[in-house]
Image: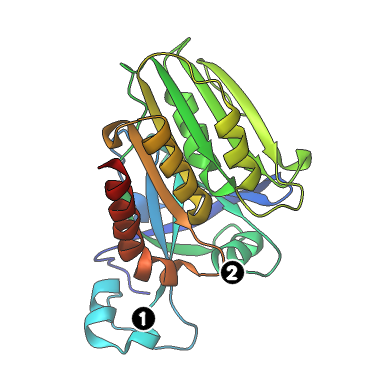
Amino acid sequence: MGEKPRDHHRGVVLRTEWISRYMIRVVVGGEGLADFATTGMTDHYVKLVFPYEGVEYPEPFSVKTCRETMPRELWPRLRTYTVRAWDPDSGELTLDFVVHGDSGLAGPWAARAEPGDVVLMLGPGGGYAPDPAADWHLMVGDESAIPAIAASLEALTEGAPAHVLVEVDGPEDEQKLGTASDARIAWVHRGGRPVGAALVEAVRELEFPDGDVHAFVHGEAGFVKELRRFLRLERGIGLDRLSISGYWRTGVDDEGWRAVKGDWNRQVEAEEAAQLR
């Protein structure tokens, strides 16, 4: 893949660990992360780069060059994952992957990853961190949001009030989430229902404390849309106090979702604006 990365970082798998029934942790490091740096956000993400096997790519390898010089069907595939942790002292980057058998691209890769395997990545990006001035915090998500929620809980100041609701398949999928805050963490079990259905009910039933809330709501796009409508229209939370986005969408892969996400977001915003008039 070339010895001089141009628009990506080159990580080497150091170790892996299953942390729940469907989630595996992959820790990467190496000299190729020398320029990697985060900026204090708790929802930092990277885009993992998966070139097609058997395809000859330009050298030195560059996603940008591939897109400028190659047919679209040969472009390397990208998959977005939240940074669970970055330790600049050790140069170790921790990523958590949801794995459901052989379904998908990045999950099966993570399940098979071994020390010495190479992974290329773009980023990091990110835009949210808990506001220490908020009276309380709301964090809501499915499995895809657990890494960001876990990092956010670790960043909260001691005693900061927070309500955290996380949906997983069942009790076997719960994880220990560490925090110095005064967080009330509720694990919502899906139990065979559509993703997010139980979570929407749980948020609607939550007794909201008084005061300024800073909210983080991420996961499958369908339930995120429902909760955005609830939080904006019924609870009156301003967009400046709400980090909310569909990380993924049922039945659509990461590339397909990125292709339509902008239009989808604009439609949601238009519908919301019409109802707020």
Q: Residue at x 35, y 30 (%)?
A: 236
* Quadrant into which the N terminus falls: bottom left
Q: Please state which amino acid type lies under the numbered disc 1.
A: Trp
Q: Count residues near mark 2 (Cα–Cα under 10 Å), then give few for <14, some for 14-19, many for 20+.
A: some
Residue 100 placement: quadrant: bottom right
Residue 132 placement: quadrant: top left
Q: What is the C-alpha distance between the residues marked 1 and 2? A: 17 Å
The disc at residue 104 is 2
Mark toward the viewer: 1 or 2? 2
Counting residues from the start of the chain, the first of labels 1 and 2 encountered is 1
Regarding residue 204, the answer to whether it shows in the image is: yes
* Quadrant into which the C terminus falls: top left
Residue 255 pos. (x, y %): 42, 71
Q: Residue at x 59, y 65 (%)?
A: 109
**Which residue is under mark 1?**
75
Residue 145 pos. (x, y %): 51, 44
